[in-house]
Amino acid sequence: MGAEGRVMEPTEGRTESQETAPGTRERVFSGMQPSGEAHLGNYLGALQHWERMQDDYECFFCIVDEHAITGEYTPDELPQRTFDLAVSFLAVGLDPERSTIFVQSDVPEHTELSWLFNAVTPVGDLERMTQYKDKSAHLESVPAGLLNYPVLQAADILIYRAHVVPVGEDQLQHLELTREIARRWNARYGPLFPEPRGVVGQAGRIVGLDGAQKMSKSLGNTVGVLAEPEEIWDRVRTAKTDPQRVRKSDPGRPEMCNVYSLHEHLTDPDALYDIRDQCRGATRGCVECKRILADSIAERFAPFRERAEGYRSRPQDVVDVLESGARRARSLARDTLDEVRERMGLGWRGAARSASTRTGSVSP
Ligand code: TRP
């Protein structure tokens, strides 16, 4: 299984191998909201792909705290959530030696570019975004930031002129809008931005332990990537299985069971046949099956806990990683923004220069 899953525009897929010099690798950008310690859904849906992409791409991984403030949130908790997500990034193997890891608000160029993009983004396009419609539906007063959320997302990506954006399926529409913004801007001000392609990991939509909804921290249907084995078991034992399998003697349907689909992501492929077989034949009960799953998770997460422990005992290292990431990101972002400002007519000093040449040409 490659790091790339379903590609939005197959015709634009990368064909040649990436055995090129570091400077010429394609650029990847992705972002995640600061929700504290990452969980199994973040890992399967995003982080494991990000981690693998580091081998082939020049990667930028961003904690998008300025997106987080467009929704319900507690200001007092945001710093800890940002820090904890950073620890999770490092724990799962995002590598500051190879990738640029940083916090969005440390690079104010993103928000500046998003304002400039607002000038080429039709409100109608923003109002059509499914995520916007879902989130604004139950609000009495809709913050403008919720509507403009995808414009900031486009700026995140395009400011680095990224080519590839690993995202969850629910973000493909925002990616399409990003491409549209790039097209419109390029058409009006001259070619500058590549149209980035969205890549959805093979894991697809990860359903939570409740067997019903998308795995998400706010729904409490998940397990943290830094959980200890006992805690993993505590969470996994509560997982919903095939609802038709009430007694152990009832034959189960793996294809209808979310525990089985998690096995597919986490358990040794050689063991899957037996797990399916013994479920269908009612020779293994759900509790035992969940035990195996909990063990698979614990095994996968073990190195993460170890790395996290190191970082937690040296929090300054995390700060250093994020600050040097931000410095590097900023210098690239600055270059793009300078060019954008110039082309959009904000480089007003040019007027003073040409005035002086005009004056110079008339005086003897
Ligand atoms: N909107 C994304 C999400 O909720 C997070 C995000 C912000 C992002 N900026 C991004 C993802 C840029 C990819 C690229 O998942």
Image (cartoon, rainbow, N blue to C red):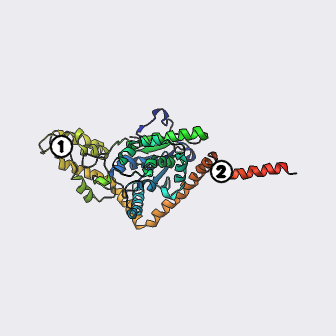
Q: Where on the picture, by quarter, is residue 260?
A: top left
Judge whether residue 66 can be spotted in this image. yes
Which amino acid type corresponds to the residue marked 2 in the rendered image? Answer: Gly
Q: Nearer the viewer, mark 2 or mark 1?
A: 2
The x, y position of residue 349, in whole percent, is: 69, 53
Q: Which mark is residue 243?
A: 1
Q: Residue furthest right?
A: 364
Q: Position of residue 164 (x, y in %)?
A: 48, 43
Q: CA distance from mark 2 to mark 1?
A: 64 Å
Please state which of residues 83 and 252 is positioned toward the viewer in this rendering: 83
Determine the residue positioned at 53% across, 50% down.
115
Q: Residue furthest front?
A: 140
- Horizontal arrangement in the rendering, residue 206 relative to residue 25 (left or right): left
Tell me whether the residue at label 2 lies in contact with that at label 1, contact meaning CB atoms closer than 8 angstroms: no
For residue 175, say whether it is visible: no
The label on residue 45 is none
Query: Residue 346 placed where, x, y %?
Result: 63, 50
Q: Residues within 10 Å of mark 2 (few under 14, many from 20)?
A: few
Q: Secondary structure at mark 2?
A: loop
Residue 347: mark: 2
